[in-house]
Image: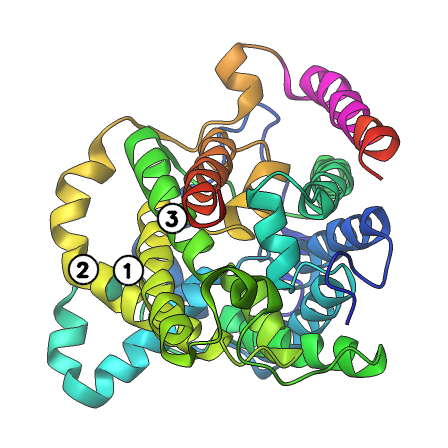
């Protein structure tokens, strides 16, 4: 299982993304996670939680500030992560070093689920990842939040059959990407999109210190 | 604890999360994302109550309840948050965030109930949308996934309206 991604041939550049990350059966390959993979997950998680805490985004005040548009820390971190990760991962992908994991686009589910997520996000004041980091920094109110996340996940599973046959089929476009949506090549899109993100970051840097 | 920002520069932290994403793609063939881990752990808890019922649910036929990479990532996130807070002198056991207390008072049970309900709502939304602020908001958007950008906008739209109602 070690570095199987490194031996993966690059898909054609016009690749429409892989079969969705959510397809049944795709887990057959990693049904018995190798200890190395589990250890890597733990190490990467420690790094992730460390960065979230150092960035201040495990704090209730900073996250609520993002939703009230009074604090731009979350936006600065997310856009910086997107810019660096986008260039890095598409660069590695062009060299055939990594596989993409594009999530399927389902308009109704993305919008409705996204709005529901946002309501919960404001009520608890943490998101799933930052809530874990918040617990690590001593915010004990993340515990009932995490209990709620577990309960809500199971609740969704109870309704998953019905939802799969209804909402999840509305506007199901498969694994489409922005360049395809507007009909330009991926590289050309990146050459325009990366500077655009950089421009937003520059505006934040100058006007929202 | 400084409540208005992080100890490190946000642009640096963001760039490092971008580099971390590159590392998870390369070494684990996985994007950063944590919400599915809660669902898997919930499935494992469901097994304790009724394994046949849990296994019969469509969601758990697609995502079997087990400890895998993402569950380890979630555990690591708690640990990493602790290491960062402890090393920076920011570790502080508290139950009610000061901002909440200023608006809604120090009632322990109110915060507990709202956090619990918020967690339920947020998890349901994440599963319906197909990801959370990390899976869609960082990993999905940096791969230019159309649905991820839509979901991210919806996260903040739903959150901004609700936060306005709470604190407006």
Chain of residue at mark 2: B
Above or below, comparing residue A134 to residue A166 in the picture = below
The residue most toward the top is: A183
Q: Secondary structure at mark 1?
A: helix
Chain of residue at mark 1: B
Above or below, comparing residue B41 to residue B6 in the picture = below
Above or below, comparing residue A56 to residue B107 in the picture = above
Please tell me if label 2 and label 1 are on a single chain. yes
Q: Quadrant of residue A27?
A: bottom left
Residue position marked by numbered label 1 in the rendering: B62
Was residue A200 drawn as part of the magenta stretch in this picture?
yes
Between A102 and A81, the one lying in front of the other is A81
Residue position marked by numbered label 2 in the rendering: B58
Alpha-carbon span between mark 3 and mark 2: 25 Å
Alpha-carbon span between mark 3 and mark 1: 27 Å
Report if the CB atoms under discs 3 and 2 are less than 8 Å apart: no
The image position of residue B54, as x and y in percent, is: 18, 74
Question: Neighbour class for label 3 at 10 Å: few (<14), some, many (≥20)?
Answer: many
Q: Secondary structure at mark 3?
A: helix
Please tell me if label 3 and label 2 are on a single chain. no
């Amino acid at each position: 299982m070690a570095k199987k991604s490194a031996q993966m041939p690059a898909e054609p550049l016009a690749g429409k993304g892989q079969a969705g990350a959510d397809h049944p059966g795709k887990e057959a390959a990693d049904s018995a996670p190798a200890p190395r993979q589990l250890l890597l997950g733990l190490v990467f998680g420690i790094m992730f939680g460390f960065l979230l805490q150092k960035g201040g985004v495990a704090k209730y005040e900073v996250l609520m500030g993002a939703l009230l548009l009074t604090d731009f820390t979350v936006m600065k971190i997310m856009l910086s992560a997107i810019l660096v990760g986008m260039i890095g991962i598409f660069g590695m992908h062009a060299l055939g070093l990594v596989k993409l994991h594009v999530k399927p686009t389902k308009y109704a589910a993305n919008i409705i689920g996204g709005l529901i997520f946002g309501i919960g996000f404001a009520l608890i004041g943490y998101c799933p990842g930052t809530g874990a980091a918040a617990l690590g920094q001593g915010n004990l109110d993340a515990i009932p939040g995490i209990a709620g996340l577990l309960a809500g996940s199971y609740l969704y599973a109870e309704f998953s059959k019905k939802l799969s046959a209804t909402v999840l089929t509305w506007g199901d476009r498969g694994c489409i990407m922005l360049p395809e949506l507007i009909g330009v090549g991926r590289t050309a899109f990146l050459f325009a999109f990366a500077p655009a993100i950089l421009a937003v970051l520059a505006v934040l840097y100058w006007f929202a210190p | 604890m400084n409540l208005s920002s992080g100890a490190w520069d946000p642009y640096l932290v963001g760039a490092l999360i971008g580099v971390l994403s590159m590392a998870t793609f390369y070494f684990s063939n996985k994007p950063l994302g944590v919400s599915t881990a809660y669902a898997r752990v919930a499935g494992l808890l469901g097994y304790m109550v009724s394994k046949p019922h849990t296994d019969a649910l469509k969601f758990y036929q697609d995502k079997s309840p087990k400890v895998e990479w993402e569950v380890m990532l979630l555990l690591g996130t708690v640990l990493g948050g602790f290491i960062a807070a402890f090393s920076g002198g920011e570790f502080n056991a508290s139950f009610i965030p000061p901002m909440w207390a200023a608006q809604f008072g120090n009632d322990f049970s109110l915060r507990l109930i709202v956090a619990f309900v918020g967690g339920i709502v947020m998890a349901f939304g994440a599963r319906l949308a197909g990801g959370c602020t990390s899976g869609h908001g960082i990993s999905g958007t940096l791969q230019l996934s159309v649905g991820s950008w839509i979901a991210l906008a919806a996260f903040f739209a739903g959150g901004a309206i609700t936060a306005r109602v709470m604190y407006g």
